[in-house]
Amino acid sequence: MPAFAVAPAEAGLRLDVVLAARQDLSRAAAQRLIAAGSVTVDGVPQTKHHRVQTSERVEYTAPPAVRSQLSPEALDIEVVYEDEWLLVVNKAAGVVVHPAPGHEKGTLVHGLLARGIGGGGTARPGIVHRLDKDTSGLMVVARHDDAYRALTEAMARREVGRTYVALLRGDLPQDAGTIDAPMGRHVRDRKRMSLHTVAPRPAVTHFRVLRRYTGFTLVEVRLETGRTHQIRVHFAALGFPVAGDVQYGRRVRPPGLGRQFLHATRLSLTHPGSGEPLAFAAALPADLSEFLAGLEAREASGGGA
């Protein structure tokens, strides 16, 4: 049964607000769980209006999994590794991971269903973690329920290693460092993530500089936590947004860059069945490597970005 202790910053907030933020649910979904009596505070069912207090223990029972009613679609998916437990895929930019309003077809999930993936039994079968539509790179996907449970638990214990390459706007002053800045849904706009939130959750990002260009910094990023949009929000908060990120960078994209420069380049985990260590790597896709080549050429010629 999922559970958490109320943090000091959450004291005085409504139960539905805290539950939605902590479990990445919609407010309506949180309210449905509370109304069904599936949520307790220190062992006692409460209403959505209950104002939580520091150190209260919130527990909830998730509704039974519903088998996906989505239709399989034959899609071109680059599979890096596959066995009876899991797949590792190299997601292309522009591909939405799971169905959402405006993206009811042609998602990665539809393609995975065509390969017999079904772990998790929800509208997002097999999906253990996500990449944004315009972020490319490595993802692990569960083939069945046992694999899904094991992999999601490993993610919660921070035992799955995820490393990205990102190009930032500006000259990041540190050569390496850690961003430890709790984040959550924006206080006014729930479609955006932010450090300005009523229900902050721990978020830790480690980075090191790989290369500096005029106007840009190429960094390797390692996630300790995996909050939605974490890399994009953390670097934007520092004043060095991911290049091409129009949502958090609030800038026109650099000429020649058609999306945010963010790629999941390495993935490591322990196999949920055998216990063997697994490690995978994916090179930068052509659009990002070509943009870097253009920066390199400008640097070599003495021109700016």
Image (tube, grey):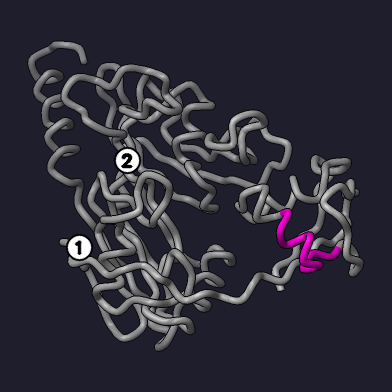
Please tell me the numbered disc located at residue 262. 2
The answer to the question of whether label 2 and label 1 lie on touching residues, with beta carbons closer than 8 A, is no
Could you give the CA–CA distance between mark 2 and mark 1, rounded to whole angstroms? 19 Å
Please tell me the numbered disc located at residue 77. 1
**Mark 1 burial class by Cα count in 10 Å: few <14, some 14-19, many 20+:** some
Q: Tell me where the magenta segment starts and ends, as one range.
A: 31-40
Q: Position of residue 50 (x, y in %)?
A: 89, 50
Which of the two marks, 2 or 1, is nearer to us in this view? 1
Residue 41 placement, left or right of 153: right
Q: Nearer the viewer, residue 46 or 278?
A: 46
Q: Nearer the viewer, residue 230 or 48?
A: 48
Q: Position of residue 182 (x, y in %)?
A: 64, 41
Residue situated furthest top in the rendering = 303
Asked if 91 appears above or below 228 in the picture, the reply is below
Q: Is residue 30 magenta?
A: no
- Image quadrant of residue 303? top left
